Image (cartoon, helix red, strand yellow):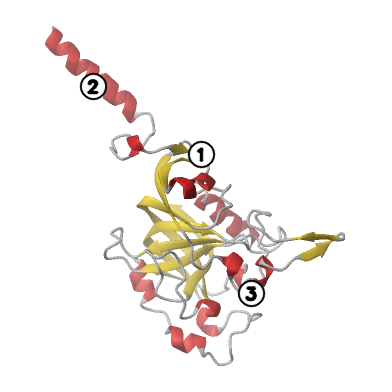
Amino acid sequence: MKFLLLPLAFIFSWCISCKSGNKISKNTNAATLDTITELNYLPAKKKAVFKTEKGENLIMRYEPDPNDSNQRKDHPQASVSFTVSFLSVENKRCDSEFFDGVYRKESKISISNAPFRTFTTLRKFMNTLQADEFMANHIPPITTSSLRVTEENRNVKINTAYMYCYSKQADEDFHVIIGTTKDSSTATYFNIEISGLPDINDLSFSDLKAARDSFLTKADKRLCSSGYYFFETPKKIQLKGSLFFDKEHFNEKIGPASARPTTAWEIHPVTFLKYK
């Protein structure tokens, strides 16, 4: 009888843990990590268990952003004060959810009117992009106020990609680094942007808000700290969005040191995102 009690107790305990919703309960590394409910605490810890608002536990690690937008010339609003009601106010992360950048604002918060083209993988999509050198020397030139040029006027759907990390920017965009594979040793990286929101009456508002809300089911909407926040296990995603060539990032090392995109092309804004 004693022989039967031990297995039954073990099975009962195992079933309870299965229903707990803690997807990392079997991960031996998790037992040694602190649990946090805000990623603003992660830079000091470097690695921790992040408990999302939905109760999911995710192992996260932190990596600095060597090109943080607060220090960049292409985001003058990040370092220049402006006057409102005679008070000097500096633009910072988390001022609101609404986009408050300057560089090519209309392109960043609008959706292309082109039909969608579907790609099974991120790599197949990337193979269709015009060369960065061509775009950087585009005729007519891409300026700080340019609307989408012909090569950018595309909408794409990518059925499979892997989300590695994200960073909150001063203009309220999230830079999200995705990869072609789940294995970092073979992945090629690409930047997509969860845009800061346009005006509530803008035609693109509902799609951009829905994409942002979906992204935030596994990300932290309270994040106000610089740097990139990595999922220990990259998240498989499906996404849609419009193309954007970020000329200001051409030939620069944008993104974290361990997961830098190889192109200045972006999907910006993302209009749909689903974790798979």
Which residue lies under the disc numbered 1?
37
Residue 33 in view here: yes
Determine the residue located farthest toward the top in the rendered image: 1
Badge 3 amino acid: Tyr
Residue 276 in view here: no
- Compute the Cα span from label 1 to label 2: 31 Å
Q: How far across and down, in percent of the image, does residue 129 sit?
A: 42, 79
Q: Quadrant of the N terminus?
A: top left
Badge 2 amino acid: Ile
Which residue lies under the disc numbered 3?
103
Determine the residue located farthest toward the front in the rendered image: 44
Q: Are marks 1 and 3 in contact (CB under 8 Å)?
A: no
Task: State which tag comes first along the sequence, 1 or 3.
Answer: 1
The label on residue 11 is 2
Left or right of 266 on screen, residue 76? right
Q: How far across and down, in percent of the image, does residue 238 sit?
A: 41, 58
* Residue displayed at 54% across by 47% down: 40
